[in-house]
Amino acid sequence: MTIKSALLGHPLKNEDIKTEKLSRLWGLPIMASDAVSSVAYAIEEILIVLVPVLGFAAFGYVPYVVVAILLLLTILAFSYSQIIRHYPNGGGAYNVSKENLGRMPSLIAAAALVVDYVMTVAVSVSAATMAITAAAPELFHYRVELSVGFVLLITLGNLRGIRESSVVFGIPTYAFIVSMGVMILTGLIRLATGHLAPIAYTPDQLAALPQQLYQGLVILLVLRAFASGCSALTGVEAVSNAVPSFRVPSQRNARHVLFLLAGVIILIFGGTAILALSLHVISIGGTTVTAQIAQSVFGRTLMYFVIQATTALILILAANTAYNGLPLLLYILAHDSFVPRQFSHRGAKLSFSNGILFILVAASALIIAFKSDPHNLIPLYSVGVFISFTLSQYGMFRKWRRDKEKGWKYKSLINLLGAVVTGVGTIVVFSSKFLEGAWMLAIVMPFLILLMLYVRNHYDMVEKQLELKEFAPYYKCSAGKRGKPGAPVVVLLQSINKAALKAINYANSISNNVTVLHVCRYPDHARELREQWTALGNPLKLEIIENPYRDITKPLSAYVLEREKTLEHGQNLTVILIKYVTSHWYDLILHNQTTYYLERALSHFRSVTSVLVPYHYSIDKTVVRDIELDD
């Protein structure tokens, strides 16, 4: 606990969640870091597609690609502002699809968002490492280690809580916005006054660029460039996914942050595109397009290194958008029983720590597998984004058509246009990047969907088997046992079901001095539990321990210590714990292993005996069939 406290700080109470919400001041950099950072490589990705084939003639087509991307950004900003207005609990494309399109489209959206967020971390951190190695080439061979180290640092920062991470990660984001603004403004002034000339490349650098124009490939190339440049749109959906993370009024603050985000992207992405076109920047090895623009505008001065440093920082911190969006999405999916329910629990600092740790593992694995090369990762990146865009746009179109609210006609047309554009974009992105690595998504996303369906089916099956409609204990205290109290027994209760009934029956069979104990992690659940207990008419006493820090082990140990002090000589306190026995070893991950840790904590008491009451369940074909019929 000392190490944990040193790394994460003091734990927070449940009521402290109000102080952990994001304001507009800090919500903008936290939610905008991914989208804003995309300008550091979006222009480069466009040029990588066009320039090698079209040569310097590519600069005549770049403006059309940039304008198309910015128009799409405007449509998405409007659409997601409506999603924020109508879906205050977050979830973005997943909740929109669930309500308006059905279960399977919602799972497709969820799988796409999971892929998108994990890829956000891997791509942004790898791009940051590339920016660092461009300024310090001697670090190139350590790029994988640097990237994984950055992911570890961001993970640690987010585990410390929303409020602390927003300040730590927000300042560098504002520094990047300001420094890019200074570069764009300075560059435009120098262009207007004729003091900024196009970059002159050496013959060796230009040797790989053909000088003729391949007319038959222009449309295909422009579409591929559009697909690559749409990486600038990643992160736009993050605000709608994390509406509950904002302070009250959360919807209003979230919408303001969304519009500010869109404005910042338009200014920085558009300004960078103008400078890249005016300077005729091409993508060459060992440096980045942003670095070349900064060097042309400022030379190798302090401001050049400021641009490089803030670019590296914003690319690292772009991953922070995923750390705010994905854990909340996993929390919503956990409540719908599509992912392990551990993802719904808040950690010591009120963050969804299991979701944060999931990002650490998944993103680090991708970085290692792809050797921290953002160009190899980006083909996997934009597909998930566009799938979620398309489903959310079409879902909102269906909503307007069904509800017919005020102004539904023009709103539905905007969403229909967005659905068509992003749907075409999905096809273009996937087909153009299929051979580059996007084919893997055709395997990963169906796998994730099948996995979520398996998890849901498992929980439904277990809930069906545990369902308890009437409390009917088999063992009741006999008259002979009611005289002198026997050895005390405590039954640890989480929820009222058949497993709890079995444990209470066992307790009644060995003692007439039974206490049922619930350690409260969430007050709402405790209130529901007490109401259920009263309604069932159980004669046993139910004690509830208030636990604002969500840790069961400490309050239980303190309770047991006090009960141990009241024991007579030679007497033992028996604590009964419920242990669920799964049908398959791999089902263990779907259930908390809290019993194991509680048993270890109780083993330190001399006069306490812990008893595990197993509850077996199995995949019964009849039960599964009943569940399917209910659905």
Image (cartoon, rainbow, N blue to C red):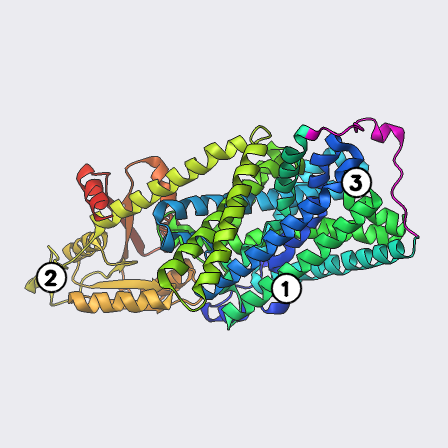
Which of label 3 and label 2 is nearer to you?
Answer: 3
| Residue at screen point 52% across, 62% down | 81
x then y, percent, for residue 430 = 54, 36
Mark 2 surroundings within 10 Å by alpha-carbon count, few (fewer than 14), some (14 through 19), many (20 or more): some
In the picture, the disc for residue 477 is: 2
Q: Nearer the viewer, residue 560 or 598?
A: 598
x then y, percent, for residue 554 = 42, 61
Q: Is residue 359 left or right of 496 when viewed as pictured?
A: right
x then y, percent, for residue 578 = 28, 51
Residue 378 in sight: yes
The magenta region covers 195-215
| Residue at screen point 53% across, 70% down | 252
Which of label 3 and label 1 is nearer to you?
Answer: 1
x then y, percent, for residue 271 = 75, 54
Type of amino acid at the residue the image marks with label 2: Cys
Type of amino acid at the residue the image marks with label 1: Leu
Q: Which residue is mark 1?
A: 260
Q: Which tag, 2 or 1, sits closer to the chain's start?
A: 1
Q: Is residue 137 above or below residue 77?
A: above
**At numbered mark 1, what does the secondary structure look like: helix, strand or loop?**
helix
Q: CA distance from mark 2 to mark 1?
A: 67 Å
Q: CA distance from mark 3 to mark 1?
A: 31 Å
Q: Which tag, 3 or 1, sits closer to the chain's start?
A: 3
Q: Which residue is mark 3?
A: 134
Mark 3 surroundings within 10 Å by alpha-carbon count, few (fewer than 14), some (14 through 19), many (20 or more): some
Classify residue 130 by image quadrant: top right
Residue farthest to the left? 479
Q: Is residue 213 magenta?
A: yes
